[in-house]
Amino acid sequence: MEIYLKDITNIGDYLSLNVSKIKKDFPILKRKINGNKFIYLDSASTSQKPIQVINSIKNFYEKNNSNVHRSIYKTSEESTKMFELTRFKIKKFLDAEDYEIIFTKNCTEAINLVVNGWVKKNIPKGKILSSVMEHHSNIVPWFSLKNPIKFLDVNNYGELNFNIDNNIKMVSLTHVSNVLGTINNVKEISEKCYENGSYFMLDGAQSTPHMKISLKKINCDFFTFSGHKMLSPTGVGVLAVKKELTEKMNPILFGSDMIKEVNLENFTVADSPYKFEAGTPNIESVIGLSSAIDYLEKIGMRNIEKHTKKITKYAFEQLQKIKNIKIYGPKKRIGLISFNLKNIHSHDVASIINEYGIAIRSGHHCAQPLMKRFNVSSMSRASFYLYNDEYDVDSLINSLNKVYGVFKL
Ligand SMILES: Cc1ncc(COP(=O)(O)O)c(C=O)c1O
């Protein structure tokens, strides 16, 4: 595979991405929507997939397909090897030598596993801290504990002022807000947690696609991401857990593949990570995730981060020029911008610009408490990735400028 960096351009300490070449790897971006070029600005919801990832799944089914961890014939051994090598690859990708990598369906399932498999058993009532900027996936699972949670507020720019009292023993926060784009200072938060004797879970759903993650540096206890937001197929997520904690963590799904021995009275559990992965896993998605990580790493996570920040900054500057626009969140952000046009519902905005082939998200973004914090019921959100460039942003701005005309405002 080619590395899609411009040959000689060295901007600061990074090489700028050759986005027009990258775009060609994503077959869906060749589509026309309503006769217009398809401009995809909803990667924070799910990313598009490059042909390399699509082909890895096709190749797997054509050459290697068999169940994993069960049989000793050739293709089953190959499937198992490909599956387990991905686990190893993720460990390196996250710089997570001291962590166990557990495959889940997505981030949501990973958080449910921590809440019901670990917190339920190890954290007493009334000692959990989260924030108002969380996705529902990091709010609702906590309610299943019937255990009061404290939520930190954000300021009017959408920034978190992290503070913790001695009573708190478990902290669960997002790394990057899916609504505000705020990048939380996770190193400082993790240090405060450790000083306080609190465990720390970090939701990396919106950071892992764009940033070089080092769990060694962040030093949280639990970390999770969803593959589908970073070029991989849907159906696979990861929970990284500090190795020493897995002994005290219970499985939440029971059945095949998570056992050592079964008789008609009882069973014994397999070692970690297998005890957390009951049933046939989503093998094809794990294979796809492996190929997605190859793709991202060939371009370089640091180059991707700088690119996403550059496009987000450009979009921020251009959006500010639109009349009567309200932009939510801080200036220093990554990957996305949420906004409202005065007196126009976000669904109307998204529906009108869809006519021009532009896909953005509208609604509450699975963050209703945050909507309430900013006194709105919904927002429009444009999100960016390695296949977006200034042309996509300009197309968004042109189409948004037409929205007021539709309402004769
Ligand atoms: C910050 C954050 N956390 C968790 C999730 C849930 O991810 P999934 O639906 O893949 O489980 C999302 C999805 O948008 C998210 O943005």
Image (cartoon, rainbow, N blue to C red):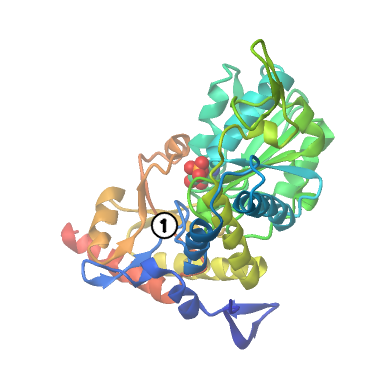
Image quarter of residue 27: bottom left
Q: Position of residue 24 (x, y in %)?
A: 44, 76
Of the 4 image quadrants, the one containing the C terminus is bottom left
Amino acid found under the numbered disc labelled 1: Asp
Picture residue at 70% right of the left edge, 77% below the top: 13
Count of picture labels: 1
Q: Position of residue 120 (x, y in %)?
A: 66, 20
| Residue highlighted by disc 1 | 42
Picture residue at 53% right of the left edge, 80% below the top: 18
The answer to whether residue 119 is above or below residue 236 is above
The residue carrying pointer 1 sits among few (fewer than 14), some (14 to 19) or many (20 or more) residues within 10 Å by Cα, namely many
Query: Can the viewer see residue 48 in this picture?
Result: yes
Picture residue at 78% right of the left edge, 32% below the top: 245
Q: Position of residue 65 (x, y in %)?
A: 53, 52
Viewer-proximal residue among 122 and 86: 86
Picture residue at 51% right of the left edge, 28% below the top: 140
The answer to whether residue 274 is above or below residue 359 is above
Viewer-proximal residue among 240 and 313: 240
Viewer-proximal residue among 100 and 380: 100
Query: Can the viewer see residue 152 in this picture?
Result: no
- Helix, strand or loop for disc 1: loop
Q: Which residue in the rendered view is the most extreme toward the bottom?
A: 8
> Would you say the beta carbon of the disc 1 residue lies within 8 angstroms of ligand 1?
no
Q: Position of residue 102 (x, y in %)?
A: 66, 41
Seen in the image, is 223 located left or right of residue 280? right
Seen in the image, is 136 located left or right of residue 299? left
Image quarter of residue 160: top right
The answer to whether residue 342 is above or below residue 22 is above
Q: Which residue in the rendered view is the most extreme toward the front?
A: 73
Seen in the image, is 215 located left or right of residue 390? right
